[in-house]
Structures are given as C-alpha cells and as structure tokens.
Image (cartoon, rainbow, N blue to C red):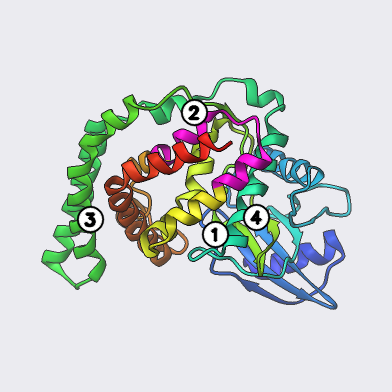
Amino acid sequence: MTAPTPTIADVLERRYGIVPERLVQLPIGQGTTNYRATCAGRDVFVKNYPPGSDLAGEADAIELSALAERHGTPVAGLLRNHVGDPIDTSSPYALSVWEWVPGAVVTTNLTVGQARAAGATLGRVHSAFAPLPASTGPSPQAQNWLAVDLADMAATIDRLSDIAKARMATGPTDPFDAQAVRTLAERRDSIGTIPRLMAELPKLTTQVLHGDYSPVNLIFDGDRLSAVIDFRPPDPFFVAYEVGRVAFYPNTVATTTDWPATARTLIEAYVRANPTVADDDIRACARVALLQLLTSLYGVKQHYLKPGLFQDALDEFWLLRHQAVRVLLDHQADTDALLHDIISNR
C-alpha cells in the first residue's frame, strides 16, 4: 500500500482541487488519523478512516453535523469531493475534508462563558435531533449499558492487574504499571456499588445524540464556541449520559475544585435551550456519568491489550477518569442536591 501522506496529498489535489504545501499528522483522535493540510490561502482538516470503518455510518454522522448547523450549532464546514461525495474512497485511505476552524480545545477550567456556550449548544443539538425517526427506535446500546456483567468486569480487572504486576516483576520499569496496579485495585473495590447505583436510576430518555460531546470536540475562540466537531453516527442513547458526560467531564472533576459550579452553569444553559428535556434525565445525569466512568476500563485496557494511536494520552485519561470516579463517589449527595436545585428552578 502506498505511504499515506503522499496518497492523501494526491487525493486532495485530484479529487478536491486542493494542493497541499504541507501535510502534517495531528496528535489527536483515537478512531481516525487526522491531518492539517496547509494550502495556498487556506488550511483544511483531513480525517482518514481506518480500514473496516463503517463509512455509511460516518456519512450519516456528517449529515447530523449539517442538521445541527441548520438549527444554529456552529460546525466545521464539510468540503465534498468533485463528484459530491462526503467521504472520498478513491484510494486505500478513505477520508473526509473539512474547513479548518481556528481556536482551542479547553479540557479543564472552562470559563463561565464557555460552560454556558457548551450547555446551550448541546441543548440545541438534542432539541434538533429528538424528532428524528431513529430517536424513537430501540436502543440496543442503552440495553447493553444497563446490563453490566460484574463478574466479567472483575475478571478483566484481575487480568489487567496481573499483566501489570508481571511487567513490574520482569522489567524494564514503566511508572504506569505501578499506577495501574493501584488504580485497578481501587476500581475492583468500587464496582460493588454499581448494582445500587443502577437500581436507583429512573426511566431515562433515549434519542439520537451528538455521540461524542465532550470538551475535546468543542473548539473555542475565547468564550465563543466556534465549532462542534466529530459527530458520531445516529445510535440512540441516554440524554442523561451526554449531558452528564460534558457537565462532569473527568478532567474538570479530577483537577479543579469549582467543578460543581461549572456543571451548574452548563446544565442550566442546557435546560434553557432544551426546555422539553425530562426532569429525570437531568436528575440522573451525574449518576449516569459516574456509572459510565465506574464501568469503563478505557485507557488502561488499551495499554495492556491493544494500545491506541496515542497511548500516552489514553494512560493519562485513565488516571483522570479514575480520579473523577473517586470524587463523584464521595460527592453523590452534593451532585444530587445541585441537580434537584436546577430542576426546582426550571
């Protein structure tokens, strides 16, 4: 197979009429390989999908981005190839091309303005997607999420811990191994709380979501949200999940002391923008965020079983997610009170 950079540069020129003067791989993204192409007078963002990707689903995700834009969400502009395709498959490297959006990703210490913008924009996205036919269909993803296999999870934790311990015993020393052994032992002790947390959940709304709405997919220019990127294919899941995930984002919860105020600002803005959201979905969003973190071994699992594209970032994310679990477990009464207050003041 031809080397990716020359092939991608050729596709850009042949299929898009774009001649890149420079094509640089970006150290972001775990599911796709991403590039910044510098051209005469403009830059573009290139997303290269790995072999085996569901390209039909990715095309549907691109349509969701366009729908969100029609309802007032700022998004990156898609550039179609010469024949109008959203994804080019003329080479072994399937790709989509987007306008470059200047700005910055902010994963901790969101300002009040940024939190408000993130919440209001998510509210508009959910309001726009709720009427879609797929939103009223079944949600296998939600059913699978609710059916946690604790025995299997415990076995996986033990397996990962054993691998880390074996590496520590044989060397060379990797500081992450000791961190993994400690955090996995703490997670093993915590998973017994999962059945109670699940039992306390109300009936939750499912619908088509953004699918990956988190600070890493929000581009800010100061307090202004200049683009929401990386919409995922339409696969109905819990509204409470997507609200809770961004409001109680691990980086924020694990590294700041004012995370409750950030969550309040974001959720209040969300409710104003999506006033038909059910009280139970707001009431449960912190609990769902906690359960998502508590039942996930994302990061540490990749480290020992199948390393990701940027495993160092995944290692750090595992540690932040684990710390966020500890904080949210210790502050369940506080988050319950915060959400009750938001609902009471609707």
Q: Residue 283 versus residue 209: which sits nearer the camera?
A: 283
Q: Which residue does the numbered mark 3 point to in the structure image?
A: 183
Q: Position of residue 39 (x, y in %)?
A: 80, 75
Q: Which residue does the numbered mark 2 point to in the structure image?
A: 280
Q: Which residue does the numbered mark 4 point to in the structure image?
A: 117
Cα distance in 3D space between marks 2 and 3: 32 Å
Residue 231 drawn in magenta: no
Left or right relative to 300: residue 182: left
Secondary element at tag 2: helix
Contact, mark 4 vs mark 3 (Cβ under 8 Å): no
Contact, mark 2 vs mark 3 (Cβ under 8 Å): no
Secondary element at tag 3: helix
Q: Give the mark nearer the N terminus: 1 vs 3.
A: 1
Residue at position x 74%, y 57% in the image: 76
Residue at position x 53%, y 42% in the image: 243
Q: Nearer the viewer, mark 4 or mark 3?
A: 4
